[in-house]
Image (cartoon, coloured by chain):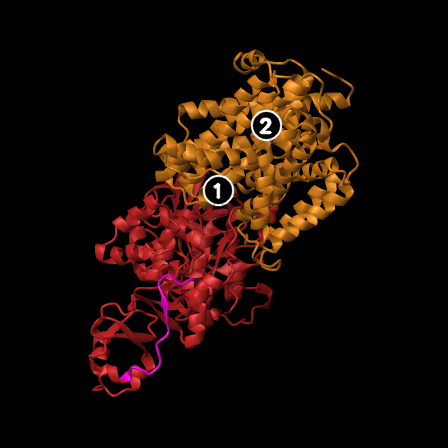
Chain colours: A red, B orange
Amino acid sequence: MTRPILRLPTLPRRSDPVTPDSGGSGSHADHPPRSLHRPRPLHNRSQRLLATRAVRDAIVSLAGVVGRPVRNQGGAEIGKLVDVVCRWDDNETYPPVTGLVVRVGRSVSFVDGAAIEAIVHTEVRLHSARVDLREFEPRPGEVLLAKQVLDYQLVDVDGVKVIRASDLYLAPVFGGYRLVGVDVSAQSLLRRLGPARWRTLATPDRVIDWGAIQPFGDTPRGAAPEVRLRTSNAGLERLRPGELADLLEDLMRPERQELLDSLSPEEAADALEEMDPEELASLLREADPAQAAELVGNMEPDEAVDALRDLNSDERANVLGAMPLAKAAPLIRLLTYPEDEAGGFMTTAFVVAPVTETVAELVDRLGHAAECPEELDAVALVDEDGTFVWDLPLLQLIVTPGHTPLHELVGEADPVTVDSHARVQEVAERLVEARRLSVVVVEDDRPVGRILADDVLDALTPERGRFHFPRLLQ
Amino acid sequence: MKVLQSRRARGFLLYLAAAGPGLIAANAGNDAGGVATYASAGAQFGYRPLFFMVVITIGYVCVQEMVARLAAHTGKGLGALIREQFSLRLSAFAIVAFAIANIGLVVTEFAGIGAAFELFGVSRYLSVPLAAVAIWALVMLGSYRYAERIFLLMSLVFITYPIAMILGHPDWHAVVANTFVPHFLRSSAFILVGVALIGTTITPYIQLYTAGAVVDRGIGPDEYKYERVDAVSGAILSDLVSMFIIIATASVLGGTGALTSAAQAAKALEPLAGRWAEDLFGLGLLGASALAAAVVPLSTSYALAETVGVERSVSKTFREAPLFLGLFTAQIIVGSAVVLIPGNLFTLIINAQVLEGVITPITLVFLLVLANRRSLLGAAANGRLARSVGLVTVVVVGLFASFLVFQTVLGWFGVSL
């Protein structure tokens, strides 16, 4: 995977696809910003704004400019810059600056973005002498960069990493100022700790282009937001469940909730399956029961049961209670098996077929099944009494002519099965013996579930979980 | 090191069942620094410090409640909250304060290990470097979890303090009088002990720890009402054990002056263990110190990495998490190196608690500001009562600390109060 971090001095391109609007001519106003959206950002990095030399030369450090004078047309100081307002907008990769918060005397007022002439390292210049002194009321999607974004967590989608913004960079592009990058370097932190004049120097050591960033918090933090995560970075959809799981683990609760809300229940459930069990339990605990139920309901039954086991009985009852009975019932049944027995880590999402069926009937049934298990590799065949007789590999099913009755495919040897009370070690041995990716679990000769090789691997791999805040007596 | 088990009080029996681990945890909170300071206070001033402990407990309960509330309602640890809520310079100041206090604690723990081994006749110049390497390796190799249980079992020795206290036949009348009748010792020696008692009870470290543990267990605003019971009862329980240590030591050694060795402190266990008192005490001291010697530097690194916003995991390599693992290693090295400077180990432990006590008011101010902030906590922000109790705690703790600093600085110029 390409590294997300742009080491600016070694950037390859000098010929720029976009001429930055440093003169303020507005000639690029007709460029829809959407055109900057790279179709596949991971492979088309050169179209990122920060790859543009002129943009890099014009960037202004937010941490540096905050606290600096705001001057009117005539150059007279009207106040000090307190914050910069940006709008998170789904159609804009680089959020436009929509206003400034300025301290005038003792009061704090809002200056509309249209009045901005230039933002430079040491000051802000306005077009007009007149400043509309009104209270800052955030409009939908608007955030205060210094108060709500700087120093908070963000997701670097390209690098698949949770970062904390140590500086934000603004640049004049597309006929206005926009947020173009975020700095994550320790140097920037030191620069901000030092004397005020250090702060104005943009020292982009490790700058991540804003196009790779998933921001949070377009609603006041702490308040119950009605609409969350208006700008969902397109790159999020390309992340693997395991990568999403890493991000979810590293985020703090409010940000984690936002990210979770932006995913579809299926995507979220896939990511949850990859999470560290303790982190997952903590996530389910803090979600409200309805959301937790939806997430758990979308997980594979064996993973869902694992997750439920890590909750205490009250919490478990709450989650199961919020689930439709059809989903909850098999989970409740699985929960009755001890965790370390085959029944405890098998999945009940598996396919059983009577030997009286023909191949074509079975294939047809599989095709019409509402929910076909994703990891299907074989079909358990049963006779008229429901007794398990043969585990039919999927490949054989595909290559056999459709009119063949299933009982003709039943092999000579005894099929390999495990008892629902078998221990992990025994299941592993059975799997090795069968040379299969999964093994059928039986109870009184009836198939009740299937154990996949990866679950056995999980159970046998020594736990080397993620690091938590160190605590005792877990 | 308190571990507040999430539990829902459903009847008295259940509560008692849950109090077991709580008691163990509260006892584990009495690390080398705690045991040394409480024992020394008892030896020097008899039962007199008991009322002071009651006052400290009120402040401690209030602080723990605030920390747990902050963590439950924001879902963030103290490091992250400070970075997000204060200017970068103030955040850096707070984090440096926390870091210095925690390094003081690491020194304490290694001094505890050294003192324990000296009881068994092993030189600290041998035991401390070996222990440092062993603890570092245990954590880095990921097998600390097992060692931790052994250390925890060893530290359970200190649970014998209440029994030793009863067997030591303290003057119960004096105990009750000194606990409940307000009084104050006007001596500069008591100021020093007072600051040490504050520092070892309301340790900045415990604040980081409690917040981290609450966040980690996914305690949200809805579960907070149970968490509060835990936080408050945990704080009270832990201070009760502290008071038992003071009483037990006071009844055996009361009025003999400040302690200067672990062997003296062990005498408090003699009514129970007779000639085995030193071995018993050494075992407990070793367990409690070794336990904390790993957890304290880990927590500091964790909180710092959280504040800066970088990788924080022991399962990463040095290249992936240089700040986290580098800080952890540095603390172990500094902590154990300080202990190797020739001098009295027991006095070093108590002096480190004094350092904690001087830093405590700084971190408490940050905490109080956060807990008062309506923009952060909304309706869960400190009400009028919590605000005033918090303020009084900060002022009292701050007065003690600044008086001590003042007195020390004057002392450099030959002025004594």
Residue sitting farthest toward the bottom:
A401
Would you say residue A196 is visible in this rendering?
no
Identify the amino acid type marked 2.
Tyr
Q: Quadrant of the C terminus of chain B?
A: top right
Q: In the figure, A370 relative to B292: above or below?
A: below
Residue A410: in magenta span: yes
Q: Residue at x 68, y 26 (%)?
A: B267
Taking depth in this image into account, of A353 and A77 the one nearest to the observer is A353
Marks 1 and 2, the one that precedes in the sequence: 2
Same subunit, tags 1 and 2: yes
Q: Which residues are magenta?
A: A409-423
Q: Secondary structure at mark 2?
A: helix
Q: In the figure, A34 relative to B54: above or below?
A: below
Q: Secondary structure at mark 1?
A: helix
Taking depth in this image into account, of A323 and A463 the one nearest to the observer is A463
Q: In the figure, B90 relative to B178: above or below?
A: below
Query: Residue B82 location in percent, x, y?
Result: 51, 40
Residue A457: in magenta span: no
The mark total stands at 2
Q: Which residue is mark 1?
A: B213
Query: Residue B192 location in percent, x, y?
Result: 67, 22
| Chain designation of label 1 | B
Query: Residue B76 location in percent, x, y?
Result: 46, 43
Q: Which residue is mark 2?
A: B161
Q: Residue at x 22, y 84 (%)?
A: A405
The dominant secondary structure in magenta is loop
| Chain designation of label 2 | B
Query: Residue A310 location in percent, x, y?
Result: 40, 51
Q: In the figure, B270 relative to B296: above or below?
A: above
- Quadrant in which residue A411 is drawn: bottom left
